[in-house]
Image (spheres, rainbow, N blue to C red):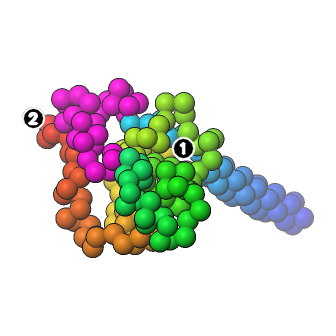
Amino acid sequence: MRTNIRIVLSLITVIISWIIFSGLIQSEQKKEKYRYVGMEKCASVCHNKKEMGFQYDIVKSSIHAQAFVVLSSEKAMQLAKNANLTQIPGESPICLKCHTTGGGLDSSFFAVTYRKEDGVTCEACHKGEYITKTYIPDEAACLKCHNNSIHRIHSFRFRDECAKIAHPRPSAKI
């Protein structure tokens, strides 16, 4: 009888240890930092080829790619003044949060190939601070910036806005 109890207790100990150990591994995996590499890297690796529909060229000519440049405009200076910001827009973490990819993160999140001057790039929508696998953004992801947080943004209609910035891969021919 005692032997049976010891076996059962040993099994329970092994099972609980395994559950705790696998939970620790999963929590560590979830916290793996993504290092933003920049739009040029995305283009050079894959996304500026015919098979991919020259997605880089489409994104590079989009309004998102101009998001950082617009921070040096008179309008941006006025919006910053109205919001009582003490820094110029191109240096303000509040502005950079939405006008650049990875804005507001410390330098450990960026590879040497990253350039904030590229504005809102591929990685802003398809990666994340701790998301290394590429994903398609949903409305909630877009509303992190398109939410009138510091200045008025035109009415954001997810489907309409997605159509404006679409950069699909061409259909595969079978």
Q: Position of residue 156 (x, y in %)?
A: 28, 70
Residue 75 appears in view: yes
Amino acid residing under circle 2: Ile
As helix, strand or loop, the secondary structure at mark 1 comes to loop
Judging depth in this view, the residue of 164 and 65 nearest the camera is 65
Left or right position of 70 against 87: left
Q: Residue at x 49, y 67 (%)?
A: 81
Residue 120 appears in view: no
Left or right position of 121 against 80: left
- Of marks 2 and 1, which one's residue comes earlier in the chain? 1
Amino acid residing under circle 1: Tyr
As helix, strand or loop, the secondary structure at mark 2 comes to loop
Residue identified by numbered label 1: 34
Q: Image quadrant of residue 92?
A: bottom right
Are the residues flagged by discs 2 and 1 in contact, CB closer than 8 Å?
no
Report the residue that reaches farthest toward the right.
2
Inspect the magenta stretch and tell me whether residue 60 lies in it: yes
Q: Residue 174 — which label?
A: 2
Q: Which residues are magenta?
A: 40-67
Q: Position of residue 73 (x, y in %)?
A: 38, 53
- Badge 1 crowding class, 10 Å Cα cut-off, few under 14, some 14 to 19, many 20 or more, is some
Judging depth in this view, the residue of 15 and 63 nearest the camera is 63
